[in-house]
Image (cartoon, grey):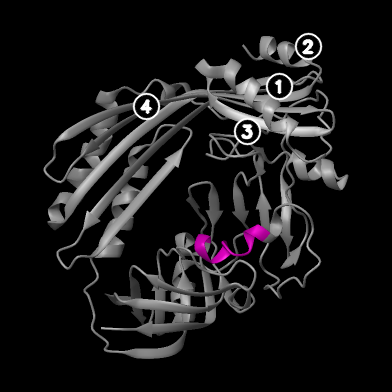
């Protein structure tokens, strides 16, 4: 299909590129009563970008409406401001594993067994549980009128649980990868939920103070959030934050079997690893074709064109280099303090200043290296950029959080408000 579509676009006197996505997802879930449901969904979409008379337009939608989408892309270009678009030429692609035949072949019966196994391992605690398992399989095709035409198959398997404790605390945990999940993956999910919900709820009254906090890998992903926009697009002339020299962040689309892996981006540019932060200093930014064409810099292979969103630059697999401290050493270094397993800023922080005030769903009190209980009603405050410059220790054990591989960080000077 993509070859004929590109031929039609070229015949209309346009430079053009196209992304086609075919994906079928199967989800099996178990409700709190153990009743099973099966959901099948599909994504069969096309994203068309055209450049004609020095103007760029785009449109996207279901592949069954491709003629209408092409017409809308030309209409978009006719009313757009003048802008350059330099399409890439064909080039060799790197090798990376993005599909597992075993994952693509998973049937409802096998997914149901995974969801039930996860549920049975957690039922003994008397929590209210919802579990699910899913798999998706399909293909991505990209091409342009300059001769690029490539395709790669994709698969993804995920498993998750939402557990509600009697005191109302809700824990949601999810894991995903290209290959089928194994029994050790189920065990890791069970262990994570138990570590979060089993410690007793503490009551420490109302306290406002500054603490040393151990950020687990999931919480580190949130802590990095305000920094990431500074690594997308054109280089910024503003002052780069004073980050700890032990922080090195890499974007790597060529890690086998991870959700963000791919050999070619949606702009038709071959992918490659990029060091974004090197020893605390800004090293490079990711660029999609739109910004690269405007600034005269080479695109980095990070173009994303999916769904109904305009072309943009996006990360693949983020890897924060691990340190040397084991979990036992982190606990000893923390002494008496707080452990934050998961966290989300919501609409905060300000991406320019990094200043935040955000509630944590739960946080754990550690005394003499051991967890003694958990706290709710906790609000964390501070400046994310300053905190990333006050790192005490970097953990040696990194964990995958979606498409990010992250270690723990021990950080000084976090504002903590405990309200009970």
- Characterize the local packing of mark 4: few (<14), some (14-19) or many (20 or more) Cα atoms within 10 angstroms: few
Q: Element type at marker 1? A: strand
Would you say residue 237 is visible in this rendering?
yes
Rendered image: mark on residue 262:
3
Cα separation, mark 1 vs mark 2, equals 15 Å
Q: Element type at marker 2? A: helix
Q: Which mark is in front, 2 or 3?
A: 2
| Magenta highlight: main SS | helix
* Sequence-first tag of 2 and 4: 2
Q: Which mark is in front, 1 or 2?
A: 2
**Residue 389 x/y as whole percent:** 64, 76
Which residue is the site of mark 1? 143
On the rendered image, what quadrant is the C terminus found in?
A: bottom left
Q: Can you say whether 3 is above or below 24 in the image? A: above
* Sequence-first tag of 1 and 3: 1
Residues at circles 4 and 3 in contact by the CB criterion of under 8 Å: no
In the image, 191 versus 303, the foreground residue is 303
Which residue shows up at 14% across the image and 36% down it? 35
Which residue is the site of mark 4? 41
Identify the magenta region: 221-229
* Sequence-first tag of 2 and 3: 2
Q: Element type at marker 3? A: loop
Q: Element type at marker 4? A: strand
Q: Which mark is in front, 2 or 4?
A: 2
* Sequence-first tag of 1 and 4: 4
- Can residue 142 be found in the magenta stretch? no
Q: In which quarter of the image is residue 246?
A: bottom right
- Characterize the local packing of mark 1: few (<14), some (14-19) or many (20 or more) Cα atoms within 10 angstroms: many
Residues at circles 1 and 2 in contact by the CB criterion of under 8 Å: no
Q: Which mark is in front, 1 or 3?
A: 1
Which residue is the site of mark 2? 11
* Sequence-first tag of 1 and 2: 2
């Amino acid at each position: 299909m993509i070859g004929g579509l590109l031929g039609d676009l070229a015949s209309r006197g346009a430079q053009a590129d196209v992304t086609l996505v075919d994906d079928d997802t199967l989800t099996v879930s178990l409700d709190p009563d153990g009743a099973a449901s099966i959901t099948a969904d599909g994504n069969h979409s096309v994203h068309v970008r055209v450049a004609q008379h020095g103007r760029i337009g785009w449109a996207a939608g279901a592949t069954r409406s491709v003629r209408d989408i092409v017409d809308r892309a030309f209409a978009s270009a006719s009313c757009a401001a003048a802008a350059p678009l330099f399409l890439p030429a064909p080039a060799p692609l790197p090798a990376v594993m993005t599909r597992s035949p075993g994952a693509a072949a998973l049937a409802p019966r096998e997914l149901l067994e995974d969801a039930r196994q996860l549920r049975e391992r957690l039922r003994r605690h008397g929590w209210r549980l919802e579990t699910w398992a899913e798999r998706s399989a399909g293909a991505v095709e990209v091409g342009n009128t300059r001769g690029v035409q490539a395709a790669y198959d994709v698969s993804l398997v995920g498993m998750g649980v939402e557990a509600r404790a009697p005191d109302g605390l809700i824990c949601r945990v999810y894991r995903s990868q290209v290959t089928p999940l194994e029994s050790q993956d189920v065990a890791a999910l069970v262990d994570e939920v138990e570590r979060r919900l089993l410690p007793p709820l503490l009551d420490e009254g109302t306290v406002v103070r500054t603490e040393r906090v151990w950020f687990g890998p999931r919480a580190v992903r949130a802590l990095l959030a305000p920094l990431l926009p500074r690594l997308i697009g054109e280089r910024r002339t503003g002052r780069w934050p004073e980050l700890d020299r032990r922080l090195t962040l890499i974007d790597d689309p060529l890690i086998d079997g991870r959700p963000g892996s791919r050999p070619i981006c949606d702009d038709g540019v071959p992918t490659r690893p990029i060091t974004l932060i090197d020893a605390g200093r800004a090293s490079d930014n990711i660029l999609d074709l739109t910004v690269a064409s405007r600034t005269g810099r080479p695109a980095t292979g990070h173009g994303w064109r999916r769904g109904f969103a305009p072309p943009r630059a996006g990360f693949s697999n983020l890897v924060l280099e691990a340190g040397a401290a084991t979990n036992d050493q982190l606990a000893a270094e923390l002494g008496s303090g707080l452990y934050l397993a998961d966290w989300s800023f919501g609409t905060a922080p300000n991406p320019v200043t990094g200043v935040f005030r955000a509630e944590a769903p739960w946080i754990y009190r550690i005394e003499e290296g051991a967890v003694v209980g958990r706290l709710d009603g906790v609000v964390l405050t501070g400046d994310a950029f300053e905190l990333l410059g006050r790192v005490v220790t970097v953990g040696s054990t990194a964990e995958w959080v979606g498409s990010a591989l992250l270690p723990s960080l021990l950080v000084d000077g976090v504002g903590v408000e405990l309200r009970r």
